[in-house]
Amino acid sequence: MNVMNKIPSAFNAKPMELPLERILPSRPVPKDFNTTRKYGQIKSSILEIGLIEPLSVTVADPKSKFHVILDGHLRFQAIRELGHQTVSCIIANDDEGFTYNKRVNRLATVQEHYMVLRALERGVSEQRLARALNLDIAAIRRKRDLLEGICAEVVELLKDQNFAADVMRYLRKMKQARQIECAELMVSLHNYSTHYVAALLAATPPAQLTNPAAEKKVRGLTSEQMARMEHEMSLVQSRFKAIEQSYGTDVLNLVLARGYLTKLLKNKTVQSYLRRHQPDFMDEFSAIVAAGSLDEDPVGAAG
């Protein structure tokens, strides 16, 4: 028998139109929710092209007949404010405290770029896209041109990440090899902020810029400070790569050593000997056994 047939669906696949008066929120929305950019985008999108993602609600309560919202509070408020009487909903079979929001993968920046391109290729005007996303046309054009001057390797590295469009503006000023190097650092450190990429640009030698003659202007830094930053960043990157290459081996060695020492210290004779003749070794071995990963300091654990 197929195992998948034994697993019940968490919700009904077919959306249903439910009256707003029969839907209750599961939590209060912030008082200023209608002034946020996110709410403005949701409302503009519904007004321009309709509701794209149905609300997720519980099964109706047997007594009150009310459904409770699991996901979609802002969509519900926008639909009500726009004067709709019903809303499309997906009814969940389980009333879970672990909300649907935690299972949603938000649209990455690169994927948003592709979405805008597909919409434009299908004849949707920039003006209509701007209205649907509650953005100005300049923002739509920045999303459209996001990957101009960016090499394919960088796109692949950053395709699942969320970051500001200015990140690509800074990377665009670098040659391809330097773009890849910076993107790898961003991924390794999980840092996709514009400030970090601006610092990487400031630390990039002129020979690795697409326009070496252009003066790099970084607010608050003199040319001497930028030159020193370039040198220090080069050292940091080389050390980081060296550590990255040896990290897997170091972890394996730690696991093997920890397993061996764990077994060794279970021997009461060995423990007794170490405590009498080598108490420092006993402390260090105990710290290694207690350490679960390289992130923990064995010396600190012993103290």
Image (spheres, rainbow, N blue to C red):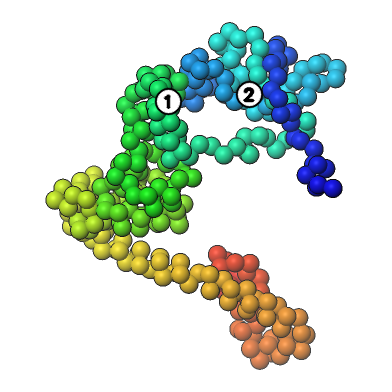
Q: Dot 1 corresponds to which residue? A: 122
Q: Is residue 291 visible?
A: yes
User: Counting residues from the N terminus, which is met first, the one under dot 2 or under dot 1?
Assistant: 2
Q: Secondary structure at mark 1?
A: loop
User: In the rendered view, would you say 67 is above or below 296?
Assistant: above
Is 250 on the left-hand or right-hand side of 208? right
User: Crowding at label 1, few (<14), some or many (≥20) Cα neighbours within 10 Å?
Assistant: few
**Label number found at residue 54:** 2
The total number of labels drawn is 2
The outermost residue toward the left is 213
- Assign the C terminus to one quadrant of the image: bottom right
- The front one of 187 and 263 is 187
Q: Is residue 79 above or below residue 156?
A: above
SS at circle 2: loop
Q: Are marks 2 and 1 in contact (CB under 8 Å)?
A: no
Give the mark toward the camera: 2 or 1: 1
The amino acid type, in three-letter code, at marker 2 is Pro
Q: Residue 216, percent across and down?
A: 20, 48
In front of the other: 231 or 19: 19
What residue sits 61% from the left and 84% below the top?
Answer: 281
Residue 35, visible in the rendered structure: no
- Residue 12 % position (x, y): 74, 28
Is 268 located above or below residue 167 in the figure? below
Q: Position of residue 22 (x, y in %)?
A: 73, 14
Residue depicted at x 51% and y 22%: 42
- The location of residue 144, given as percent across then percent down, is 36, 33
- The residue at the point 23 percent across, 61 percent down is 228
What separation in Å lies between label 2 and label 1 (alpha carbons)? 24 Å
Q: Quadrant of residue 15?
A: top right
Quadrant of res 235: bottom left
Amino acid at pointer 1? Arg
